[in-house]
Image: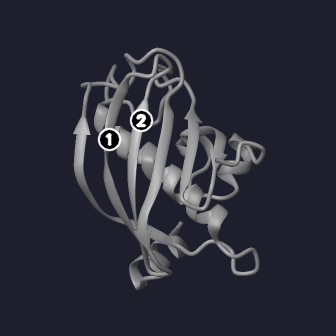
Amino acid sequence: MNTSATLDRAAIAARIPHSGPMCLLDALLSWTADEIVCRSGDPADPAHPLRLGDALPAACALEYASQAMALHGALCAPAAGGPTPGFLASARGVRLHVCRLDDAPGALRVHARRLAGDAGQAMYAFELRDAGDRALASGRATVMFGSALAVSVERAS
């Protein structure tokens, strides 16, 4: 993996459609044409935008993974063309190994690996781990790029 090209939260937010508190990634740790590893902020933060009551449900892992995939797509996009708008089309084989993410110690590590794809879509395998390297969630997701839905969602935001 390319460990020399890292980004902070502000640089990540400039490359994905999420900003402010909804940008869940604090740092890009490494990436290649096929993989990306990011670190999140503290999932126990009481101001976390995805909290439900006093908990951060494990299902929120899909949002962390989606943001890592969006960042990977932006980093891999041709510089002249910029990133292509996209949306999460499906999630398969998702396994939640815990009930909540806010019980995890420290920051989360998000790893996504591109399994297949072309200019119109990409399939990724993803995994979230806590600071102690315990698996929290894993699965596969397909992202669609450049469709009418993705473009209309991008224009609306």
Query: In the picture, residue 140 is in which quadrant?
Result: bottom left
Q: Residues within 10 Å of mark 2 (few under 14, many from 20)?
A: many
Whether tag 1 and tag 2 are in contact, CB under 8 A, the answer is: yes
Q: Residue at x 52, y 17 (%)?
A: 106
Q: Is residue 40 left or right of residue 51?
A: right
Q: Is residue 125 left or right of residue 31?
A: left
From the image, tell me which residue sits under label 1. Answer: 138
Q: Residue at x 52, y 72 (%)?
A: 154
Q: Position of residue 142 (x, y in %)?
A: 35, 64
- The amino acid marked with disc number 2 is Leu
From the image, tell me which residue sits under label 2. Answer: 128
Q: Nearer the viewer, residue 29 or 151?
A: 29
Q: Residue at x 78, y 44 (%)?
A: 4
Q: Position of residue 151 (x, y in %)?
A: 49, 79
Query: Is 147 situated above or below 25?
Result: below
> From where the camera sits, is residue 17 visible?
no
**Element type where label 1 sits in the image:** strand
Q: Position of residue 48 (x, y in %)?
A: 48, 30
Q: Nearer the viewer, residue 2 or 135?
A: 2
For the C terminus, give its image quadrant: bottom right
Q: Position of residue 132 (x, y in %)?
A: 46, 16
Which residue occupies the extreme bottom position in the image? 148
* CA distance separating discs 1 and 2: 6 Å
